Image (tube, grey):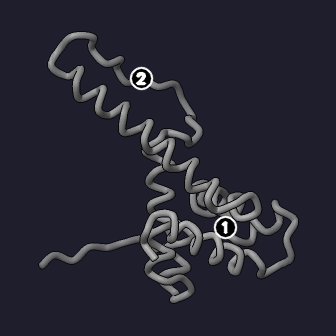
Amino acid sequence: MRHVTVNVAESPIAWLAARGMLTAAQLAAGERLRADYERAGLSARLTMRWDAAPPAKSRGGARAADAWLARIDAHRRFHAAIDHAGPGLADICWRVICAGEGIGGAEKALGWPARSGKLVLGLALDRLARFYGTG
């Protein structure tokens, strides 16, 4: 058995789940959304991409095509999940889960009253759990 140190403050939903404010199904749905977001390559890039273009006709071409198809599937899943959450709930999902913004900052940016973001995020995560089949 190995011991692993995990930074629960890495994402706002992991922080909430560590304090018992989210169910396991809500956390799993949020992590699936964040994984789809990152796998689809939707986050902003700070620098130029320096990775090599996939070779046209070599042994690595098939793996590059599979990676590209996985990226497209993740892109479709992400947008379908956000659409399933709905227009009011998609905003908090994107800000907190994908962008890693704190709930207080998301409340201010969306013009919501204080301490309302946690409740709305819980509702959004419930919808995502139904979409991903985790809850």
Which residue is drawn at the image coordinates 52% and 76% (left, top)?
Answer: 15
Give yes or no for contact between labels 1 and 2 (Cβ–Cβ under 8 Å): no
Q: CA distance from mark 1 to mark 2?
A: 31 Å
Q: Residue 114, image x and y in percent?
A: 82, 79
Residue assigned mark 1: 102
Quadrant of the drawing holding the N terminus:
bottom left
Residue type at mark 1 is: Gly
Residue at (53, 82) in percent of width and height = 22
Q: Quadrant of residue 102?
A: bottom right
> At 42% across and 23% down in the image, what residue appears?
50
Kind of element beneath mark 1: loop
Camera-side residue of 115 and 91? 91
Is 119 situated left or right of 15 in this image? right
On the picture, is 81 further left or further right than 103?
Answer: left
Q: Which residue is mark 2?
A: 50
For the view shown, which residue lies furthest in the top direction? 57
Residue placed most toward the observer, 98 or 3:
98
The residue that appears at 59% across and 39% down in the rendered structure is 44
Q: Is residue 105 left or right of residue 32?
A: right
Residue 65, by quadrant, is: top left
Q: Amino acid at mark 2?
A: Trp
